[in-house]
Amino acid sequence: MTIRIIQVDDDYINNIANERLIKKLGISFESVNFLDPSEALEFLSKDEQKFDLMLLDINMPRLNGWEFLDKYKSIAGKFPIFMLTSSLDPADQRKALEHPLLTGFFVKPLTKEIMLEIFDIAKLTVLA
């Protein structure tokens, strides 16, 4: 099974690091990456492709993760969204736990254990 992931993070290096981590785990995946959350919203509003999960950054210029989710509500797909942050702000974590569109909240950088937890929470079978 090939996992389809959409990443919305203005940090190109972080997106590549996540892809390398998934590759190291031996998981078959395809990734569509957006550095600009507005472009991701436009893509998601027009595209009929099915994704298995989204990795969404909180702190991005022009449109942060929370604002992205507010706009995404009207076009929400049916796949889990995991918010990623380098912030340790407990208010962000509380807000994420209460947000109806979010499936999880994790601090970057992602590790092997966190990535496997994300796949497990998303109910994706990735390892034999």
Image (cartoon, rainbow, N blue to C red):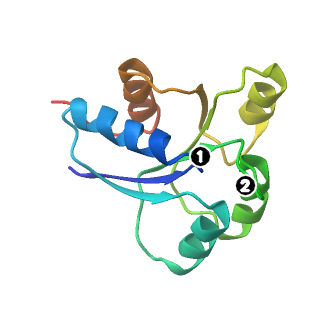
Which residue is painted at 71% across and 26% down in the image?
A: 87
Which dot, 2 or 1, sits closer to the camera? 1
- Helix, strand, or loop for circle 1? strand
Q: Are marks 2 and 1 in contact (CB under 8 Å)?
A: yes
Is residue 109 visible to the viewer in this orientation of the structure?
Answer: yes
Which comes sooner in the sequence, label 2 or label 1?
1
Work out whether 43 lies above or below 124: below
Where residue 66 sits: x, y (%)?
A: 77, 48
Which residue is painted at 72% across and 57% down in the image?
A: 68
Q: Amino acid at mark 1?
A: Leu
In the picture of the structure, the residue carrying the numbered disc 1 is: 56
Q: What is the residue that sits farthest to the right in this orientation?
A: 91
Q: Amino acid at mark 2?
A: Leu
Along the viewing direction, whichever of 128 and 67 lies nearer the viewer: 67
Where residue 102 sits: x, y (%)?
A: 65, 42
Q: CA distance from mark 2 to mark 1?
A: 9 Å
Quadrant in the rendering for residue 77: bottom right
Which residue is painted at 45% across and 23% down in the image?
A: 114
Q: What is the residue that sits farthest to the left in this orientation?
A: 128
**Picture disc at residue 91:** none
In this image, 108 relative to 26: left or right?
right
Is residue 125 visible to the viewer in this orientation of the structure?
Answer: no
In the picture of the structure, the residue carrying the numbered disc 2 is: 69
- Helix, strand, or loop for circle 2? helix
Along the viewing direction, whichever of 36 and 114 lies nearer the viewer: 36
